[in-house]
């Protein structure tokens, strides 16, 4: 069982940066798990923002965040990060991290473990 806890969300202005963290709680280790960041805005479908493989050697970014967001991980700290730069009002959403041992990709339905989410609000 993997328990995920997101943090780092908040209210910022357009053009600002935020860094989200996704930590595996308790004795859980992230080693071996691919981890993805997803977001969902009110009235919109869930969107895959970024994914990182268990080793950190492979990454995927959604088209809307390419060049602005960076996903990284520190397996020694059991933490995955999402550095969000040049934030835009359309980035406003609840951001979730998800983890899976067997799947690496952008389909949220394939991930077994999810955090509770952290709100990111970008004002114009």
Image (cartoon, rainbow, N blue to C red):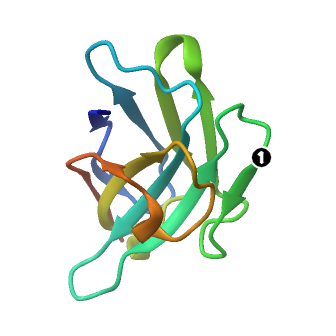
114 shown above or below 40: above
Specify few, some or many for label 1: CA neighbours under 10 Å numbering under 14, 14-19, or 20 or more. Answer: few
Left of 7 or right of it: where is 70? right
Residue located 58% across and 55% down the image = 103
Q: How many marks?
A: 1
Quadrant position of residue 56: top right
Q: Secondary structure at mark 1?
A: loop
Left of 69 or right of it: where is 36? left
Image location of residue 16, percent across then percent down: 47, 50
Image location of residue 90, percent across then percent down: 41, 76
Residue located 36% across and 20% down the image = 28
Residue located 45% across and 74% down the image = 47
Residue highlighted by disc 1: 58
Residue that sits furthest to the bottom in the current view: 43
Image location of residue 5, percent across then percent down: 27, 34
Q: Nearer the viewer, residue 95 or 53?
A: 53
Q: Nearer the viewer, residue 73 or 114?
A: 114
Quadrant position of residue 3: top left
Residue that sits furthest to the right in the current view: 57
Residue located 57% across and 49% down the image = 102
Name the quarter where the C terminus is drawn.
bottom left
41 shown above or below 7: below
Name the quarter where the N terminus is drawn.
top left
Image location of residue 44, percent across then percent down: 31, 86
Q: Nearer the viewer, residue 6 or 53?
A: 53
């Amino acid at each position: 069982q993997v328990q995920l806890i997101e943090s780092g969300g908040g209210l910022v202005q357009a053009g600002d940066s935020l860094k989200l963290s996704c930590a595996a709680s308790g004795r859980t280790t992230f080693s071996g798990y691919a981890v993805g960041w997803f977001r969902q805005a009110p009235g919109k479908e869930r969107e895959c923002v970024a994914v990182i493989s268990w080793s950190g050697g492979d990454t995927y970014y959604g088209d809307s965040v390419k060049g602005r967001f960076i996903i990284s991980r520190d397996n020694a700290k059991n933490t995955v990060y999402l550095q969000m730069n040049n934030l835009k009002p359309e980035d406003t959403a609840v951001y979730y991290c998800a983890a899976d041992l067997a799947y690496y990709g952008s389909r949220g339905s394939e991930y077994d473990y999810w955090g509770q989410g952290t709100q990111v609000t970008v004002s114009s």
